[in-house]
Image: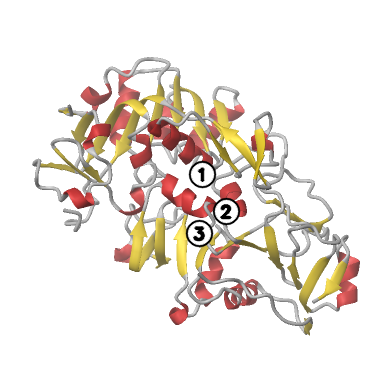
């Protein structure tokens, strides 16, 4: 029902975004009335910044639409949890369904947006977020691959660089892929990137920067950039 | 014809060594803990278990794995903060893992129950989990062939049944129950209560009784009453 708007012209903000500010920025870009799945971890914070009158409906892939906030105290019900297995609440208008229906509505393109974390995203929107491929690591994928390719728009939220300063926006992912050409936007602490999933000329559009100039960003990221 | 058994042990007593068993639940929610622990008690070995996860803590599926009864797990998300029973067996090379994206896992189970011989899904295309699988391009998009997961037994937790096996579930504990009930030769369901036939509104039935072979009542102390599902 609602489609993501392609905004605006390039802007530069003065300071790097904290996790809360980044979540608020993502929330502000979610259109009223959208059906949205927020991934486990940092993306869950986005729900704190959705306006109560926005009409946004949250999907949780374990089988619910109309998920409310985390449950506390007497509201905790072991039969009512989110995909991260955290007790949650139901909002008026909620519905429950089994797993095949839940993933059919995702794969069938009925969700408007999903927001996921990432280890790496490539310039053409390939996503790596499920496995570092380290020997000895026990792999676990959950619904990440279904989510990445299922929603109409897949947003990634992450810090732009790893702890040792490597850009997570890359020419080509070196970690095992979650999905091919699926990410449409990347929200990071220092910039918001718009991805052309058709491949385009291989460059990535920068909608805004925070705490760095466009030129400083170009030096950080190993893919060609252009201003929105 | 549905059989109402006197105990969880009676319900699972004939599950043989080497069986493939679908086990409902998403983490603890909807996990048929009492049926699984009865299976621990029967001593059945060499099982292939299909579940979203690979056990939490030391109860239910974790106990079955910890007791060394499971040869192979087919699941989407084995590694969790409390999956130590599985982790230990996996690292010791004592358990086989087939990792399946969650939606493909659900659809493969659904396909088995619906008599579908396989399906092409976009999920997993271009990833390590699609390696070796047939790929087809349909209308410009790439799809991977996935095959059904059929089982000898399904162990499911529902909320309420009637005497002909119609089932309702509670909230997100529904998860894999309705599809697993369709995909096994013998489906065994534990419920909070069985109501007389005719006492359940046919409009609210989630799993029709045709899919259910055995019922056992396991009252759940923590389940709030009543729900408006009948």
**Left/right of residue B50 with respect to residue A38 in the rendered view:** left
Residue at x 82%, y 58% (from the top left corner): A164
- Residue B99 coordinates in the image, percent (x, y): 57, 35
Q: Is residue B138 visible?
A: yes
Q: Is residue B77 visible?
A: no
Give the label on residue B67, or none: none
The residue to which callout 3 is attached is A110
**Left/right of residue B123 with respect to residue B7 in the rendered view:** right
Residue at x 64%, y 36% (from the top left corner): B129
The residue to which callout 1 is attached is B103
Q: Quadrant of residue B66?
A: top left
Label pair 2/3, CB-CB below 8 angstroms: no
- How far apart marks 2 and 3 lie (CA) works out to 8 Å
Q: Chain of mark 1?
A: B
Looking at the image, is mark 1 or mark 2 nearer the viewer? 2
Label pair 1/2, CB-CB below 8 angstroms: yes
**SS of the residue at dot 2?**
helix
The residue to which callout 2 is attached is A150
**SS of the residue at dot 1?**
helix
- How far apart marks 3 and 1 lie (CA) works out to 15 Å
The answer to which of A65 and B97 lies nearer the viewer is A65
In the image, residue B144 above or below residue B199: above
């Amino acid at each position: 029902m609602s489609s993501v708007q392609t905004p605006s012209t390039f802007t530069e903000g003065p300071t790097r975004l904290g996790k809360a500010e980044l979540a608020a920025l993502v929330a502000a870009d979610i259109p009223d009335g959208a059906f949205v799945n927020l991934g486990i971890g940092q993306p869950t914070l986005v729900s704190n910044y959705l306006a109560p009158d926005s009409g946004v409906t949250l999907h949780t892939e374990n089988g619910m639409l109309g998920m409310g906030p985390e449950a506390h105290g007497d509201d905790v019900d072991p039969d009512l949890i989110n995909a991260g297995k955290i007790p949650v609440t139901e909002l008026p208008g909620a519905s429950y369904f089994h797993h095949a229906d839940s993933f059919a509505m995702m794969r069938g393109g009925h969700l408007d947006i999903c927001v996921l974390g990432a280890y790496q995203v490539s310039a053409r929107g390939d996503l790596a977020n499920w496995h570092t491929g380290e020997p000895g690591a026990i792999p676990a994928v959950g619904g990440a691959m279904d989510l990445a390719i299922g929603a109409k728009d897949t947003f990634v939220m992450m810090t732009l660089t790893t702890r040792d300063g490597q850009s997570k926006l890359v020419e080509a992912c070196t970690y095992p892929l979650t999905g091919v050409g699926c990410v449409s936007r990347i929200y990071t602490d220092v910039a918001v990137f718009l991805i052309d999933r058709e491949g385009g000329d291989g460059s990535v559009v920068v909608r805004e920067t925070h705490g760095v100039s466009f030129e400083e960003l170009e030096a950080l990221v190993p893919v060609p950039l252009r201003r929105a | 014809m549905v059989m109402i058994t006197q105990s969880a042990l009676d319900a699972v007593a004939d599950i043989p060594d080497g069986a493939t068993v679908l086990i409902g639940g998403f983490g603890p929610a909807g996990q048929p803990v009492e049926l699984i622990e009865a299976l621990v008690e029967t001593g059945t070995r060499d099982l292939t278990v299909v579940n979203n996860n690979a056990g939490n803590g030391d109860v239910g599926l974790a106990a079955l794995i910890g007791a060394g009864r499971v040869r192979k797990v087919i699941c989407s998300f084995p590694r969790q903060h409390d999956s130590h029973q599985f982790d230990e067996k996996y690292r010791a090379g004592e358990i086989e893992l087939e990792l399946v994206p969650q939606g493909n896992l659900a659809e493969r189970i659904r396909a088995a129950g619906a008599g579908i011989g396989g399906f092409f899904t976009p999920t997993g295309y271009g990833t390590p989990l699609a390696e070796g699988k047939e790929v087809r391009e349909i209308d410009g998009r790439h799809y991977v062939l996935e095959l059904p997961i059929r089982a000898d037994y399904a162990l499911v937790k529902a909320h309420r049944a009637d005497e002909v096996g119609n089932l309702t579930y509670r909230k997100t504990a529904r998860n894999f129950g309705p599809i697993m009930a369709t995909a096994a030769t013998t489906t065994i369901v534990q419920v909070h209560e069985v109501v007389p036939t005719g006492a359940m509104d046919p409009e609210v039935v989630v799993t029709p009784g045709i899919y259910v072979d055995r019922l056992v009542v396991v009252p759940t102390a923590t389940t709030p009453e009543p729900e408006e599902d009948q």
